[in-house]
Each structure stands twice: as C-alpha cells, then as structure tokens.
Amino acid sequence: MKGRTILNILLGMALSSPLFAGPSMVSDLSPFSLAHPVLNMQARPTGLEVSFDYQLANSQYYKTLGDDSIALDAQTELTTFSLSAPLSDTWSYRIAASYADVSGGFSDSFIESWHDTFGLPNGSRDKYAQNLMRLQYQRDGQHLIDEDEAFSGLTDTQVALQYALSDDSALSVFVNVPTGDSDTLLGSGSADMGVSWQGIYTSESGWQTSTQVGAIALGDTGLLEVEAHSAAAFGQVALAWPVSEQVVLKLQVDAHTAYYDSPLSPLGKNAVMLGMGGSILLSRQWQLDIMVSEDIAVEASPDVGLHVRLKWRRGLG
C-alpha cells in the first residue's frame, strides 16, 4: 500500500509538470496559409493524448504594388481535433483534422481596442467598416481570387509519425492529406510532405524550452498554384515556467518562410508570430491552454490571434 501511494504521488507530479504543458498550437490563420498546415508536435508523447483546439484571428491588409493588388479583410476561425499516442518505445503518431470558417466575423472592434490599449498601430482599420468580408488578389491584371462571401469546410488532414532519438528529442515525418477544398483556399489540392526535429530541455529550476525546426515540400496550391514556392521552412521555440504545480506561463515564437512568390506581405513575406499565455493543469488528465498571438513580422500573418486548447491525456496508475 505504501509503495502504491508513493507511485501515485510520483505519477501525479509527472503529469502536472511542464512536460505535460508542452508548446501550444499557434497557427498562421491567414486565409492564404490554411492550405499548408505545418507540424505542431512535442517530443515523444508518453500516453494517449486527445486535443481540441479553437483558434481565431483577424486579418486586414489593402495594398497595390505595380500590377499586383490585394484586399484581405476577413476573420478566420479554425477548430482542430487531434489524436496522438505512442506505438512503441520509440515510435508514436499524430492525426489532426481541422475545420475552418472564413467570414467578416465579429472581432474587428476587439482588435482595434487591443491595439489602442497597447499603443499599437491600427493600420488601415480606421478607413474601412468593421466586419467586412473581402478576399481579392490580382496579379498582372488577372483576378486569381475574388471572394466577398463567407466560406467554410475541412482543411487538409495531417498525419505524422515520430521516432524518438532520446527521451528529449525526436524526428517526425508528416503528410497533409488533401481533404480541403482547393477552390476556396482551404486545401492545397495535393499532398504536402514534411520532416521536422523536436527537442525539449528542462532545467533544474523547472524552466522548460522546447524547439522544433522543419521543412515542408509544397504540392499544388489550388487557386495560387502559379505563385507557389516548392518548399518552405518552419520552426518554433517555446519557453515554459511553472509558477505552481497547476499553472505554467508560456512564451513562444512560431515562424515559417513564405509560401508564395509575391511582393505583397500576406503572400510573399516570412511569417513570425509571438504567442503569450499559459497552461492550467486542471487535473492529472485535463489541461487548458490559452494564448494570444501578435505578428512580429508585420502584415505577414494576422495581427492578433486567440488560441485555446483543451487537452486530455489517459491517466496512469
């Protein structure tokens, strides 16, 4: 009985550690990036994990450069269900399916208030009515995209396999299966394939750093095939600090190189996003992540985003 009690205590401590917190999902929610989801996976999951993610971001960008012009004024909501688990001592898998909704939305006033509170510029937001839906892109006099009505549906489904190099590092390969509609920017129309390395370092004082670097080979890109690069790089650095056994504060940077060859920032500029928030370990099995993101590379990704994750892990012991 005494041995059982000690084991339960140790398991409880392990499940309420920053390792369970891991990096949050902070996706680039620009409508132009939805077709190419990159991998978001921590090193070596130790048990069955089920996650439900809700992300919301608002984009507004109007620009004309020579013969290229863009009108990007939309709210994106992305809901993701993911499942990951070990297959053996060294192999594990992750499957993620997402549903996106792109519309005029309801968050323009919140974004403007956020910018005013922190003294950030509103760009062109003061020039246009709130909650408009405009998604137009013209290249060399040809309209490649012209949408003024909301659209929604599945995006491409991601399947990943991970091989543990050690307790704290792993290699992953993944494929984005073309389940999204390429006619509305929700899917690429073909399979993207990628590879990445994940690593975790935990200090004696409890600080944890997780890192991911990778590359993705881009297949066809539907409406913007003529503009697409053949490959892109991506990465993530996350810091986690446990202020108690139940609360972890987090700071992370997510980035990817441009998916398209264009002088316009939402398509042709490398995206860098800063996420700020934390995790609440509700129990040995349940965890809640809440983060707010801001675009460091201005205009390359939505300027403000909300990211919420509810994660369940099978209890041990």
Image (spheres, rainbow, N blue to C red):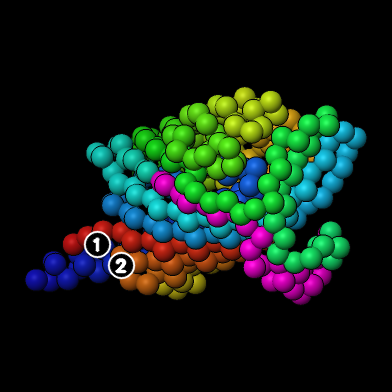
User: How far apart are labels 2 and 1 at the CA level?
Assistant: 7 Å
Q: Name the residue under label 2.
A: 284
For mark 1, give the secondary structure.
loop
Q: Nearer the viewer, residue 139 or 272?
A: 139
Which of the labelled discs sits on residue 225, or is there none? Answer: none
Q: Which quadrant holds the N terminus?
A: bottom left
Q: Is residue 310 above or below residue 176?
A: below
Q: Mark 1 points at which residue?
A: 315
Q: Position of residue 25 (x, y in %)?
A: 51, 54
Amino acid of disc 2: Arg
Left or right of 206 on screen, residue 306: right
Count of picture labels = 2
- Image point (37%, 35%), residue name: 161
Tell me the magenta residue range.
96-123
- Image point (69%, 25%), residue name: 226
For mark 2, give the secondary structure.
loop
Q: Nearer the viewer, residue 241 or 38?
A: 38
Q: Is residue 144 above or below residue 51?
A: above
Q: Is residue 216 above or below residue 287?
A: above
Bin the neighbour count of mark 2 within 10 Å (Cα to Cα): few under 14, some 14-19, many 20 and up.
Answer: many
- Image point (87%, 42%), residue name: 64
Q: Which residue ends up furthest to the front in the rendered image?
A: 149
Residues at badges 2 and 1 in contact (C-beta under 8 Å)?
yes
Amino acid of disc 1: Gly
